[in-house]
Image (cartoon, rainbow, N blue to C red):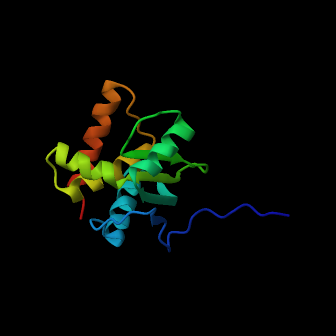
Amino acid sequence: MDQPAPPPNDSFPRILFHYEDVYVPDIQEHKAEAWILDAIKTEGKQAGDISVIFCRDEYLHRINKSYLDHDTLTDVITFDYTGEEGYVSGDIFISYERVEENAKLFNQPLPHELHRVIIHGVLHLLGYRDNTGPEKAAMHEKENYYLSLRF
């Protein structure tokens, strides 16, 4: 008989970073992990299993078409797997190529734009949406707040 999985344990890291055919020099995994965990805690939740997957445009474009039926490039797609109340779990796919382009477009330092996209994905896992003007404004405000707390 299968036993239910225990809730996540606070004694081990839960943010995993993966790289799909892309090199990301602007990430300090341990610092980013602590920052993400602090944001989740500040929002009154606990981290479950969260993967941040860095990839290329082509990889994320295939995901966008296959799972969301969107034939466009994007910088981030989040899949929320949260099941247990109070815990946050999911996958955050990030196109590093889009992050590089956006940093140039918005005249931002690359590490700043990279962390903006990471926290954007985390905010989606926390329940924030950006489908309407007011939702986008609230999301942007939260992004800026957590970016101000970044290491």
Residue at the extreme bottom: 11
Q: Quadrant of the N terminus?
A: bottom right
**Residue 94 horizontal side relative to residue 89, left or right:** left
Q: Is residue 36 above or below residue 12?
A: above
Q: Is residue 120 above or below residue 13?
A: above
Q: Pick the residue in front: 87 or 116.
A: 116
Residue at the extreme right: 1
Residue shown at 48%/33% (left/top)?
A: 70
Q: Pick the residue in front: 38 or 150.
A: 150
**Residue 2 horizontal side relative to residue 114, left or right:** right
Residue at the extreme left: 107
Percent of width and height locating residue 71: 46, 34
Residue shown at 38%/63% (left/top)?
A: 22
Percent of width and height locating residue 108: 16, 50
Percent of width and height locating residue 49: 53, 60
Q: Pick the residue in front: 23 or 40.
A: 23
Residue at the extreme front: 58
Res 125 visible: no
Res 66 visible: yes
- Tell me how many marks there are: 0
Residue shown at 32%/65% (left/top)?
A: 24
Task: Give the quarter of the image for residue 74.
Answer: top left
Q: Pick the residue in front: 40 or 137.
A: 137
Q: Quadrant of the C terminus?
A: bottom left
